[in-house]
Amino acid sequence: MFGYIVPYKPELKIRDYNYYKAIYCGICLQTKKIGNIPRIFLNYDFVFLYLILKEHFNIQEEFGNTRCIAHPQKKGVFLKSNKILEYVSNQMVILSFLKLYDDYVDEKRLMSFTLYNTLRPYIRKITRMYPTSFKKIKELFEKQLLLERSECQNIDEVAHNFGQILAEIFAYNNDPKLREIGFYTGVWIYLVDAIDDYIDDVKKKRYNCLKYHLQRCKESSALFEREISILKVSLDNYLARLNELIKGYNNQLLDNIVQLGMYSKTEEVINKLKANFFKELKM
């Protein structure tokens, strides 16, 4: 994922924030069991995945204290290994592996290709545990690349395909509710990322699913506001459905992330685009 799914800290209780950090540290230490190199792809979005799966399957947790390279002076609390933490860590490495290939295809960055090849031995080991799931994720990812290479102008088609990738990752034990949560999370991530990267993508002539719709707005602020308004409504609808799906978990941290954190991130990336669109993309 891309680092957009985070709590809204001003409304977060200290105990929830500490718990959130403990999960993050737990994912890091779990990933270390795979290898140190995969740890560089650690991502807060996967704390959200863990929280969803943990609540869904009512996982009992244990915590410990340790020092790490990032904070050697002070011991920190971490979540000890469990079956869900192991799954989340493995899925993080798999998605990072595929994302590196995407980055290389998009920008021909040697570093991305080097890291992609470096992760190969780890991926072979991980995918033996989830052969069917990995095959499906790989197929969907290859479709994603084809859609983007063909400059797909249908926002729903390309965003929904990415949603299916996240649906496959979230659907632990092939659970339909988790699949739906993953789908809406994936669609939201893809669109927020497209908004966030739009100006940079246009300048560097990279694919962006919003390009066809927004490039027509360069001479009309009214048309631009209309397109942004439609996009905002779509994003709010995806989050509203996500909110409905997580209500049954009765988890304040999840509520904070979806109801406040993700809504806040939506506003942040949209306001950033609105502030810079006409200034940065002059005719």
Image (cartoon, rainbow, N blue to C red):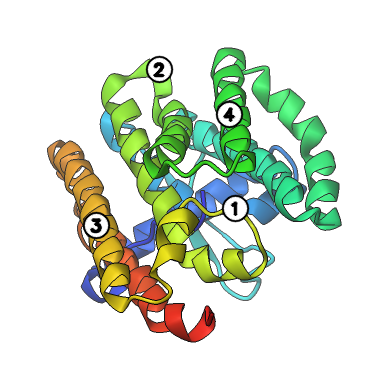
> Label 3 sits on what residue type?
Ile
* Dot 4 crowding, Cα within 10 Å, few <14, some 14–19, many 20+: some
Sequence-first disc among 2 and 1: 2
* Dot 3 crowding, Cα within 10 Å, few <14, some 14–19, many 20+: few
Q: Check disc 1 and report the residue beneath it.
A: 207
* Extreme-top residue of the structure: 132
Q: Which mark is residue 230?
A: 3
> Label 4 sits on what residue type?
Lys
> Label 1 sits on what residue type?
Tyr
| Circle nearer the viewer, 4 or 3 | 3
Q: Check disc 2 and report the residue beneath it.
A: 173
C-alpha distance separating marks 4 and 3: 26 Å
> Label 2 sits on what residue type?
Asn
Q: Report the side of 279 relative to 56 (left or right).
A: right
Asked where in the image residue 31 lies, by quadrant, the reply is top right
| Circle nearer the viewer, 2 or 1 | 1
Mark 3 secondary-structure assignment: helix
Mark 4 secondary-structure assignment: helix
Sequence-first disc among 1 and 4: 4
Mark 1 secondary-structure assignment: loop
Asked whether residue 101 appears in the rendered view, the answer is yes
| Circle nearer the viewer, 1 or 4 | 1
Number of marks drawn: 4
| Circle nearer the viewer, 3 or 2 | 3
C-alpha distance separating marks 2 and 1: 34 Å
Asked where in the image residue 129 lies, by quadrant, the reply is top right
Sequence-first disc among 4 and 3: 4
* Extreme-bottom residue of the structure: 279
Image quadrant containing the C terminus: bottom right
Q: Is residue 184 above or below residue 138?
A: below
